[in-house]
Amino acid sequence: MSKPDYPLKSPYATGLSGRCPRCGKGRMFKGLLQIAPTCEVCGLDMKFANETGDGPAVFVTLFAGFFVLGLVLWMELTWQPSVWVYVLVFAPLTPLICVGALRLLKGLLIALLYVNKAEQGRLQ
Ligand SMILES: [Zn+2]
């Protein structure tokens, strides 16, 4: 039994939408951030997705921290609110930004891994 050929999908479209990098229809994520073991539509084994490791988390930490700190500085310079306003705004906003950005970046990196057939270096 031969597998059907799939036309190459844009890793940006499939990755950012959390869709399977091969068929573009199945879901890449089982939960919020957990990768599904296989695609429910084309059966793509998602084991290769472990190759992303901590890569997305590093980018999210750097960029989300920069973004949130920029917002805090902008709020302070514009309105100078009291401390409880920062707690009320940024305690829920920061995790939302981080988890949302982590899901987008994880999906994008997994789709880029698939499209570029990236894998660990091996000695012959
Ligand atoms: Zn698929």
Image (cartoon, grey):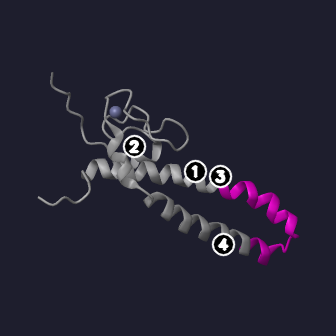
| Residue type at tag 4 | Gly
Amino acid marked by disc 1? Gly
- Whole-percent x, y for residue 40 in the image: 39, 27
Q: Quadrant of the C terminus?
A: bottom left
In the picture, measured across the screen, residue 112 lies left or right of residue 78, that is left
User: Which one is earlier in the sequence, the residue at label 1 or at label 2?
Assistant: 2
What SS does tag 4 mark? Answer: helix
Q: Which mark is in front, 2 or 3?
A: 3
Would residue 85 be counted in the magenta stretch?
yes
**Kind of residue at badge 3:** Leu
Q: Position of residue 86 (x, y in %)?
A: 80, 65
Relative placement, left or right, of 2 versus 39 is left
List the residue tagged with mark 3: 96
Q: Report whether the residue tagged 3 is closer than 8 Å to ligand 1.
A: no
Which amino acid type corresponds to the residue marked 2 in the rendered image? Thr
Relative to 98, residue 37 above or below: above
- State yes or no: Cβ of the residue under disc 2 lies below 8 Å from any atom of ligand 1: no
Mark number, residue 14: 2
Residue closest to the eye, 45 or 62: 45
